[in-house]
């Protein structure tokens, strides 16, 4: 398959590199020093699943030079989606599928408004990885996993080919019967751990263990679950319990990417995660006091990171 990775950060870089290492025709869309390093030395992956380097690696900052591909993996941050959708237009051919791997649940609709609903699937991933240096991705936790599928549940042959490509590359991949349920299951988890981790400035092993912060974590999970049910998503009744068990069995040092961005003073996905829970809750009449507390507590730092507030 001809696959473009739009956004070669921790997620896009890792999964794209695995596909390229597995024999797929992958081009990385990147910029700046990261792009130069990939073009010069290849893309290096240090991983708990094994280290490797993709070299030579195809990389560009101009989607127009790449042209239409079979599939686009979208690896930018959730708040970058509107601009990314416009920029990736040259990658879209008649049969191209676009798979968003962002945290959150709003990316598919945002992409569809620009690229056409017929091209955009629902998607999600599980991975803890980040850019360690230009041209260098470090995978530090969680079993790599991707899931994607048509939002109305109908079969898609290109999606089937992409799943096979991932599986041949040694990455667990699935096409769930209901991608909306799968996306919200991930969102329930990531919005809670990102927000609680960022507001407490502590890794997963700490806030899941202290009774006070564990209570905040459980209530955060429950609030997103309530919003999902109010939106008509057919979430299983034991979703919160299963996600809490997953958290309890995760490595204690896990830190979500939003948490890391906030601590390091970068723009984050606060508005797309905790902010989205608050917005949707307000629209549906579902109380979200924990997410409201997290969002408003972190908002001044978010605005400072974006240059919209000085202090």
Image (cartoon, grey):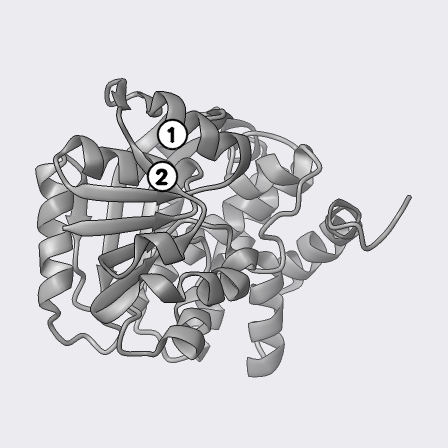
Q: Nearer the viewer, residue 301 or 192?
A: 301
Residue 266 screen position, x and y as percent: 67, 40
Give the SS element for disc 1. Answer: helix
Other-residue count near label 1 (Cα within 10 Å), few / some / many at <14 / 14–19 / ≥20: some
Q: Residue shown at 68%/61% (left/top)?
A: 292
Q: Residue shown at 73%/50% (left/top)?
A: 306
Q: Quadrant of the C terminus?
A: top right
Residue 66 screen position, x and y as percent: 32, 52
Residue 153 screen position, x and y as percent: 18, 74
Q: Residue shown at 75%/53% (left/top)?
A: 299
Left or right: 113, with 308 as reference point: left
Taking the image as drawn, is residue 251 in sight? Answer: no
Q: Residue shown at 57%/43% (left/top)?
A: 258
Left or right: 246, with 293 as reference point: left
The residue beneath circle 1 is 39
Whether the residues at callouts 2 and 1 have beta carbons within 8 Å, the answer is: yes
Give the SS element for disc 2. Answer: strand
Q: Nearer the viewer, residue 176 or 162?
A: 162
Left or right: 139, with 164 as reference point: right
Checking the image for residue 233, the label placed there is: none
Residue 191 screen position, x and y as percent: 51, 53
């Amino acid at each position: 398959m001809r696959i473009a990775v739009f956004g070669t950060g921790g997620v896009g870089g890792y999964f794209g590199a695995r596909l390229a290492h597995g024999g797929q025709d992958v081009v990385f869309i990147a910029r700046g020093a990261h792009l130069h390093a990939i073009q010069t030395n290849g893309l290096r992956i240090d991983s708990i699943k094994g280290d490797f380097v993709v070299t030579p690696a195809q990389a560009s900052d101009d989607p127009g030079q790449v042209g239409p591909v079979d599939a686009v993996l979208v690896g930018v941050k959730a708040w970058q989606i509107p601009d990314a959708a416009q920029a990736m237009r040259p990658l879209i051919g008649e049969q191209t599928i676009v798979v968003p791997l962002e945290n959150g649940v709003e990316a598919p609709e945002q992409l569809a408004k620009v690229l056409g609903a017929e091209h955009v699937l629902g998607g999600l991933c599980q991975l803890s990885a980040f850019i360690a240096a230009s041209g260098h991705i470090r995978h530090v936790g969680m079993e790599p996993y991707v899931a994607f599928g048509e939002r109305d549940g109908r079969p898609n042959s290109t999606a089937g080919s992409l799943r096979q490509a991932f599986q041949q590359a040694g990455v667990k991949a699935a096409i769930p019967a209901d991608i909306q349920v799968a996306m919200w299951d991930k969102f329930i988890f990531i919005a809670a751990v990102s927000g609680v981790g960022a507001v407490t400035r502590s890794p997963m092993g700490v806030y899941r263990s202290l009774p006070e912060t564990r209570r905040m974590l459980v209530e955060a999970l429950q609030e997103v679950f309530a919003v999902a049910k109010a939106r008509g998503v057919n979430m299983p009744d034991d979703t919160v319990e299963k996600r809490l068990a997953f958290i309890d069995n995760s490595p204690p040092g896990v830190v979500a990417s939003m948490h890391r961005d906030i601590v390091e003073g970068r723009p984050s996905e606060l508005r797309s995660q905790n902010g989205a829970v608050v917005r949707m809750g307000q629209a549906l009449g579902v109380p979200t006091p924990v997410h409201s507390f997290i969002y408003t507590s972190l908002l001044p730092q978010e605005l400072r990171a974006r240059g919209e507030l000085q202090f």
